[in-house]
Image (cartoon, rainbow, N blue to C red):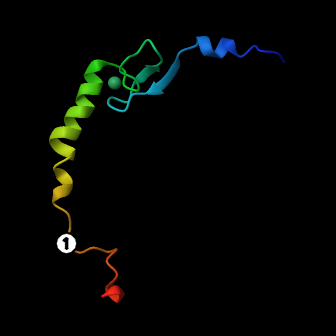
């Protein structure tokens, strides 16, 4: 049991792309990690900027966390 863990370091780590759900290489060879490609990275950022950031504006007026005993 000596220093023989360099074998796993050679293998590129595969993760799930948050945008398309496909396989993505999580390593120095993939500058768009954890995304699989530049397109997937752009899609995710676009969704956040255009849609998801404006959705929560319509929040329900009734706050379940509002403690009436405090007032
Ligand atoms: Zn992808």
- Residue depicted at 58% across the width and 13% down the height: 11
Q: Toward which corner of the image does residue 33 lie, by quadrant?
A: top left
Residue 52: image location, x then y, percent:
21, 45
| Residue 51 pos. (x, y %) | 17, 43
Q: Residue at x 16, y 60 (%)?
A: 58
Looking at the picture, tell me which residue is in the foreground, 18 or 65. 65
Q: Quadrant of ligand 1?
A: top left
Query: Farthest residue in the front direction?
Result: 71
Q: Position of residue 38 (x, y in %)?
A: 28, 19
Quarter occupied by residue 41? top left
How many circles with numbers are drawn on the protein? 1
* The C terminus, quarter of image: bottom left
As drawn, 49 above or below 5: below
Q: Local crowd at mark 1 within 10 Å, few (<14), some, or many (≥20)?
A: few
Question: According to the image, label 1 marks what residue?
Answer: 61
- Residue under the point 21% across and 37% down: 47
Residue 44 at x, y percent in the picture: 27, 33
């Amino acid at each position: 049991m000596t220093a023989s863990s360099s074998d796993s370091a050679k293998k590129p780590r595969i993760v799930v792309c948050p945008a398309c759900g496909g396989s993505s290489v999580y390593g120095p060879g993939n500058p768009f990690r954890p995304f699989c490609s530049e397109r997937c990275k752009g899609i995710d950022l676009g969704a956040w900027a255009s849609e998801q950031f404006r959705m929560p504006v319509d929040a329900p007026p009734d706050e379940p966390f509002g403690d009436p005993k405090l007032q």
